[in-house]
Image: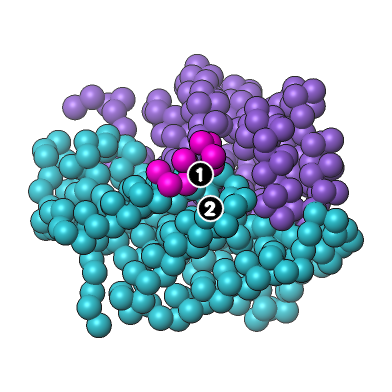
Chain colours: A cyan, B purple
Amino acid sequence: MMKISLDPRTKIFMIFAVSFIVMVNAVTPLEWGIRIIITLIPIILMITEGKFASAFRFSVLYAAALLLLKFFISSESTGFISAILVGYCGIVAQFMPAMITAWYVIRTTKIGEFMSAMQKMHVPDGISVSLAVVMRFFPTIKEEYGSVCDAMKMRGITFGGGKVTKMIEYRMIPLLFSCVSIGEELSSAAVTRGLGAPVKRTSAYELRMKSSDLIMISIFMICVILFISAKYFG
Amino acid sequence: MNDNKLKAKDFITVGIFTALLFVVEFACGILGFIHPYIVASYVVMIPLVGSIPMMLFYTKIEKFGMITIMSVLLAIIMFVTGMGWLGAPLIIAAGVIADLIAKKGDYKSFKLISISHGIFCLWVCANYFPVIVTAESYRKSLIDGGYSAEYCENLFRAINSKTIAALLVLCFIFGVIGAYVGKSIVKKHFEKAGIV
């Protein structure tokens, strides 16, 4: 399988373009078309990176939401089940493109690449380091949360006795404990690698804009321009 | 070297707690799709639940800038997840003011920390901005986008230019209350364990 590796800067541009389009609701078929295109591109990119399972999962979810929205739900529907369905479809159809793109970017960008791209764009160290940690940390939180739940299951605690405060406390506190200690390890690892040293750091990754980057950027540019013109100029 | 400068360790702490806070926000946010009144009650839920990581975060702050960076990150995340940029100035402004207030007490005085947390929580209200500023077109776009008319009715009854003042005040109050709740939880669990 041909592997298309994009420059992190292209990926950041993709995120911005997608979240811009996602923010405005689509009404006409052309606008929906653009939305579907910008959703498909990250999915195809995922497939080229060999992440078949998640590409499949995302496309099934998105397609289900779109179909439900198109055929089963109108503005007249009321009631509890339809409220949940509307909620599900609304959240998926509206924000899924942004989620898919963000997921793709987080999963396929190495932290080193990301930092070196940020450095090239002259983003202050504070923002880029913290952002890199945030990016890196979501999967960790998910993992830790899974272990917390496992531990609770093992001791026979399922819902914290039905009390909301206990439910939150039982999950939050162990999660915080492990996150804090992971943070400590992370920062000592980072300092060992020279993060925070008062010199300009070099990077192992040579970043260059390739032709695939330019093609991606122009596709998204065209999508954004088409979307804006369709939305505001008729 | 200047001692007041933020170091790599501080940046990493900011990143971790921002991620935690966002997870709390996201978990509460999903509930909002059940009923629009829950959307309005974010101002109660998020400050209360989010106060636990935030209070732990406050114990780790020693220098100016950490809360500011956190608010910038939140603004970026809100934009990326499709909330729009209308709220971004409010989020960052709340972060800077909260930072200044907490700095006054040298990040030690609990009274000032609780006020600072109240102001920081105003970032929750920033998510309502698109609803208020562009009320008419937003309503239309929601209905076109597949939301039921009933949902929209309720959403706009709960959040409009009249109730936003009340929501802001509520947000602040529950931020302050949350500070006390979070403080007691941090004391109960973390101080005994010797982490703080």
Q: Residue at x 69, y 64 (%)?
A: A69
User: In screen coordinates, is B84 left or right of A165?
Assistant: left
SS for tag 1? Answer: helix
Q: What label sits on residue A9 in the rendered view?
A: none
The subunit carrying tag 1 is: A
SS for tag 2? Answer: helix
Tell me if residue A83 can be seen.
yes
Q: Position of residue B7 (x, y in %)?
A: 29, 37
Q: Position of residue A222 (x, y in %)?
A: 35, 49
Q: Nearer the viewer, residue A123 or A68?
A: A68
Q: Residue at x 47, y 46 (%)?
A: A227
Callout 1 touching callout 2 (CB < 8 Å): yes
Q: CA distance from mark 1 to mark 2?
A: 7 Å
Q: Nearer the viewer, residue B10 or B41?
A: B41
Instruction: Tell me which corner region of the image, top left, top right, bottom left or bottom right, holds residue A137.
Output: bottom left
Q: Position of residue A47 (x, y in %)?
A: 36, 76
Q: Nearer the viewer, residue B95 or A60?
A: A60
Residue identified by numbered label 2: A31
Q: Residue at x 52, y 77 (%)?
A: A57
Above or below, comparing residue A36 to residue B135 in the picture? below
Counting residues from the N terminus, which is met first, the one under dot 1 or under dot 2?
Answer: 2
Q: Nearer the viewer, residue A145 or B184?
A: A145
Q: What label sits on residue A230 in the rendered view?
A: 1
Q: Amino acid at mark 1?
A: Ala
Stretch of the chain drawn in magenta: A225-234
Tell me if residue B102 can be seen.
no
